[in-house]
Image (cartoon, rainbow, N blue to C red):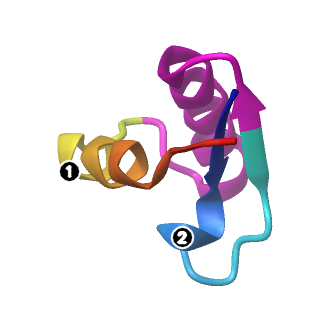
Amino acid sequence: MKVFACGDVVPGCGRSFTAPDEAGILAQVADHAAADHGLTDIPAELVEQVRARIVTA
């Protein structure tokens, strides 16, 4: 299982995500970024920051 905490990239955000794989995390994070942070076009640098902070639980 993979885990990502949005606050590791966006200080102050308390959302966290779990999924069986990285693709599942990235899909959830994309939805969250659009709905809660207003990001509809996610820069590649941000995707890399997220990937770097996904951990295995």
Query: Which region shows up in magenta?
Result: 18-40
Which quadrant does the C terminus fall into? top right
N-term-proximal mark, 2 vs 1: 2
What is the three-letter code of the residue carrying label 1?
Answer: Glu
In the picture, measured across the screen, residue 47 lies left or right of residue 34, that is left
- Rendered position, 19 above or below 18: above
- Rendered position, 10 above or below 49: below
Residue at the spot 20% in from the left edge and 51% down from the top edge? 45
Please give the residue where the numbered disc 1 appears in the rendered image.
45
- Give how far across and how far down residue 28 sits, in percent: 67, 29
Q: Nearer the viewer, residue 41 or 53?
A: 53
The numbered dot on residue 2 is none
Please give the residue where the numbered disc 2 appears in the rendered image.
8
How crowded is the residue under tag 1: few (<14 C-alpha within 10 Å), some, or many (20+)?
few
Residue at the spot 36% in from the left edge and 36% down from the top edge? 41
Residue at the spot 60% in from the left edge and 40% down from the top edge? 34
Q: CA distance from mark 2 to mark 1?
A: 14 Å
Residue at the farthest left position: 45
Frontmost of labels 2 and 1 is 2
